Structures are given as structure tokens and as C-alpha cells.
Amino acid sequence: MSVTRRQALQIGGVGIIGAFGLAVPLTSVNAKSASQLPSRNMPKPYQRALPIPEILKPRNTVVDPDGRKRHLYKIEQKAALANIVPGLSTPILGYNGTFPGPTIKVNQGERITLEMDNVLPLFHPQWGYRLDTSTHLHGSASLPQFDGYANDLTGRDYCKDYEYPNFQPARTLWYHDHAVHNTGQSVYSGLAAQYHLHDEVEGNILPQGKFDVPLTVSDAMFAANGALGYNDNTHSGLWGDVILVNGAPWPVMKVQRRIYRFRILNASIARSYRFSLSTGDAMTIVATDGGLMPAAQQVTSWRHGGAERYEVLIDFSKYPAGKRVELRNLSNKNNVDYDFTGKVLAFDVTDEPVDTSGPGARVLPTLLAPSMTMSLKASDSVKTRRMRVKRDNGIWTIGGMTWDEVVESGYRKVLADPDLDDVEIWEIENSSGGWFHPVHIHLVDFQVLSRNGQAPFAHEKGPKDVVYVGEGETVRLLMKFEHNRGRYMIHCHNLPHEDHDMMAQFSVGIDTNDPDPNHPVDAVRPHLISQPAPAESASAEGTAGLASPPATEPAEAAAPGTTTPATSLAAAPAGQKDVVAITTARHRLKKDMTFAGTSKFAGSTAPTSATVVLYDVTPGRAATRLGAVKANTLGAWTLTVKPGPAKQVTVVKAESSIGGTATASVRTS
């Protein structure tokens, strides 16, 4: 099948092969081009230098009570113009207005608080949907309320404060938008960036600094005016005719005659790649999604699905100065390929003096690092679950479930419910047609046990969080559900599939009918950018974030003493139930502490005369009483602690004398 440029992109630069209305597997399609750009504006391969995204600097760094550093970052999601095609500007959505967004680098054990501001237009300027956002740090074992749950939305002029623990082994992560039903268009518009977690192990064996290079690979098509075109072919996928690396079309990079480390992220919303070198030489894969492999793997090409990350070493010392080596794309089944989608990036070997300082400059490693994930045995599994990825009546499903069913259930319906620290095998089958599906499981790293009963490919013999489930393939995955309790998502990372509606959830160690202190939507709400972050409770009644009038006079409490929170308090009158909420909780180290909230019987306007006691319940130390305050006649209370404790308070618990309790995270900035 051949598609001409005239046939493609018929409606304002928003079609690929949409004129054919494809709703069936593509098998393979070759075409000249998709973009409607005039020839003078159509980018040509290897004309631009490879751009390297800036490294984001923290606004502030503090030391938590346990001695670990915490970095405060701030990012604005905003509309901007990018210089992608010659002579024209392309409207994008970007983190700090760039695509890709800035890279965040952090050392293992150093925590991050990321203030993510939504200053985007209310509606997408081209495609009209509402630009609410949810930020997912892909590859992080974050608490559910900080994981970028699809329905945990931040609207325009609001900020969500994300907490990232960074306790996992070194790895390449990335952060991207995850807003329900619009993830594909928002990521395609530019909301994607890399995040690098370092530790001593990789720091001693792999290239660092300018020899540790992020490569965010994506594809796009363009209208005649330079704007992005979009058509997902009845939700099958979008395949552009221009390959971008770090936001530049087919760039070129000058390299010294030594070993380089490349962190290759497939940020395309549907396209898969099969990378190879023009020389036919092998490359050395040293890390997968979840970090270092047990042993390095030599490959001449590998299949790379959406959202997968592979860290690859290329040794340029074998090439003479002046040699050009291309990173090419051999493609896979069910992509749409155009004249130049077989090209990705060029490396020009220079004769400049070789910098051999730092690790990994001359010698390719063999043995790397063990990990808990790769040490698991199939015999450790307590349960095997089987699920299919397929299309039912035009809707994408996973395990027979759609995300709309999850939402309609009040976020109670789950695909699986392992207990904390359970080890399970998940078998994922793709036998419903010709589409491939990169399946992402949040929270966990997993081991690929087998593919169609055979050993996994060499390139995936490391800890993973995305698995390429190809046409007619069945994969078996082994994983331990550790770190956190709560609800997490599983979905296809072909983002048009995810948006329509191949996404479900599983729970770890909870009954989703019970109150959930880590509820992914209710536990931590966004706040207005112009106001401090409220710390909110996830109560049994789902009343987190209740607005409350201030008390007439804020109470003051002396410096706290150590005690144990009461396990039960006076019961509410028959037929009434207390609802206590913490709407503000802030403690800046060595400064005053401020708390506010409500305590009143649900549905009652009568005075309650409740007394609220606040406790410091920061994980890792004994509970400490911070102070007590009487609610006013409207049921509102405010507590100021002078002076605040010398140790940073990160979690507080409120107990009301009329029976309610609530916990909340504390804003520390």
C-alpha cells in the first residue's frame, strides 16, 4: 500500500492515513510523507546539531529529620513555540515551555518535592479538549497520590505538589502527562522529559557527565503552517513522518573516539523502533527500565516499544576520525513508515583529544549488578494471573476491563488485588489481531520470564516496567508488589489505546471498599498556585479538602512534648457522624507551624464545641503531641505552634473529641 503526500493530511494537517479510515491492523504501510509542509520547510536529515535538554536546578534543598536531603523543584506546564521545522514555529505544550522538558538528576536516597504548576490555556489551542493535567514519574515507586493517577487532575492556575522518594536503584525514568483520555495528545504536544536516578554502583562503572547522553526519540507530522498534525486512525495509533531526537529532526552529534552512554527513551505515542547502527556493529545494553542488568548484552538491533528505556553503550574508538555512524530504525510490524523514518540520528567521529577521565571511557563492562527483581524465582510466586489485551467493539481492553468501568465503580474495581510483598506471575496474551501493545505496570519492576514459552530477548534481561507484547505473543512476567499499599494503574503505552480505553487498575494490600489514606485522587489535592498547599485528609466519607471559615482567633500551642495518640475518643451522638478535615498543614524547618481544618457532625449546623488534638506522626519516629485547639461555632479550627520543633514534621494526625480522625502530609516550603 502506497500513500501519497496529497492523499495524507487532508484536514488542516491532522491526518496520517486517515483518508483510509483504518480500524484494522495495518500489517505494514509505506508512504512518501505525511506532513503538508512546503519543501523549503521540510526538515532534512542531519542538518541540526543534537540539542541536550537543560538540567533542572532545585530552588532549595533541606535536610529531613532522618538526615536525607530533600530538593524542592518547581516546573510550569505552559504553551510555547518551538523551532522544529525550518522557517516556521510550532506551537507546543512544554514543561517550562520546552520539548523535551528539563532533565531532573538526583542521587539515590535524596527526596524531591516537585511543585507542578498548570499555566496552560484552559483548552488545547488546536484540538479543543480541556487542558487538565496529571504528572506521572514513570519508573518511580511513588505513593498512589503522587503517581500521576489518570483522574488526579490539576486544572488551570492550580499546582500539584508531588513527592518522589528516589530509594530505588539507579535508572532512567521519565515524567509525562497522564490526564485521563487525553494523555496521547498532551504527550505528543510536548509534555515529556527525562529524570535520572544515580547511585554509586552505576556511577563507578558507566560514563557520566557529557558522556551520559539522554536521547528522547519521538515522531511527528506537520501542517503547512508548522503546527503539529494529529490523527490517531480511529484510536489505532499515530505515526509521523519526521523523527525527532530531543525535539530536533534527525540531528547529528559530534563524538570523541571513546565509549558513550545513551539513555534512549521511546516517547512516541504509538511508533515502535528497531534500532541498529549503519555499520552493523553491536551495541552494549547495560540497563533496562528498572536499572542495571545483571550482565551486559551485546546486540546489533533491538525492538523498542513506547515508554521503554534502554541504556546503551557505543564504542566510537573503533572508528577513524571523520567517520559518520548512523543510528537507524529497521522498524517493526504494524508501524507506518515513510521515506525517512528509517533514519534517527548521526554521530560524526572527531579528531579532538579524547577525554578518558571518569568511568567507562575505554572498557565495556560485562558483569553489572544484581537486583531484587532479577533474583526472583518463579517458585516464589503465590498466584498466576492471566489477562488479554484486545479490541472489543472498537474499544481497547486489558483483562476485559476498561478505565471507564474503573471510574464508574468509584475507583473500586480492580484487575488484581495482591497483598503487600506478594510475588505473582502475570501472563499477558495478545492474540486478538495484528496490533502490538507496550504494557506498563505502575509501582513495580518485573522480570520477563518468557515470551511464547521461550527465553526473553537478550535486550530485556533486566528489570522492566514496560513489556512489548507483540502480535500473537504471550509474555509471562514475575514481580513483587512491595514498597506501598494502594491503587495503581496498568495500561497500554500506545497512548491512543490507553485513552480509548486500555487502562485498568490493581490494588496492593488494601480493600478498595475501605477508607484509603493514600487514595490516588483524594489524599492530596491540587491548590491554587497563588496559595500555600493545603494538606488534606482522605477520610472515610471522602471529604478531603473541605473548605472552612477560619477560627475567629488562631490558637497557639507551646513546643510539643512526646505522647501517644488516643486510640478512641468520645462517640458522636446517635445518627450523626463526625467529619474532621485538615485543610492546611505547613511547617518550615525551625519556623512556626500552622494548621487549619474543620471538625463537625456531617450535615449539622449546630455548635459542636469539639477539641482537636494534633500529633506529629512522621514515619520513622514516635508520635508526638503538637497541641490542641477548640473549634469555633462553625466547626472551624486553626492551630499555630510557636516555636515549631527542630525536626521537620512531614505527616500530622488530627483527633477530634467528637470522634473523627484525619491524617495529612505537611507542606515543607
Image (cartoon, helix red, strand yellow):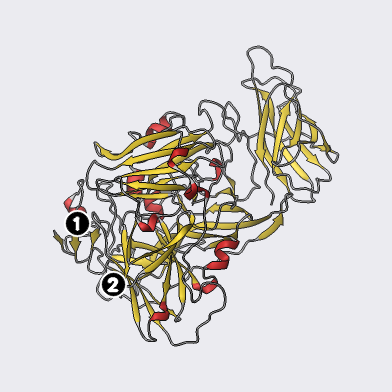
Kind of residue at disc 2: Met
Residue 523 lies, with reference to residue 162, above or below; the image says above
Q: Which residue is drawn at 81% across and 45% down?
A: 645
Residue 364 lies, with reference to residue 393, above or below; the image says below
Left or right, residue 409 beside residue 616 = left
Mark number for residue 492?
Answer: none
Residue identified by numbered label 2: 42
Q: Which residue is drawn at 38% across and 46% down?
A: 449
Mark found first going from the N terminus, 2 or 1: 1
Residue identified by numbered label 1: 28
Q: Residue at x 40, y 50 (%)?
A: 466
Q: Position of residue 202 (x, y in %)?
A: 55, 63
Rendering quarter of residue 516: top right
Kind of residue at disc 1: Ser
Q: Do the residues labelled 2 and 1 touch (CB within 8 Å)?
A: no
Q: Name the outermost residue toward the right.
A: 558
Left or right, residue 478 beside residue 44 = right
Residue 273 lies, with reference to residue 315, above or below; the image says above
Quarter of the picture containing the N terminus is bottom left
| Residue 514 can be seen, yes or no | yes
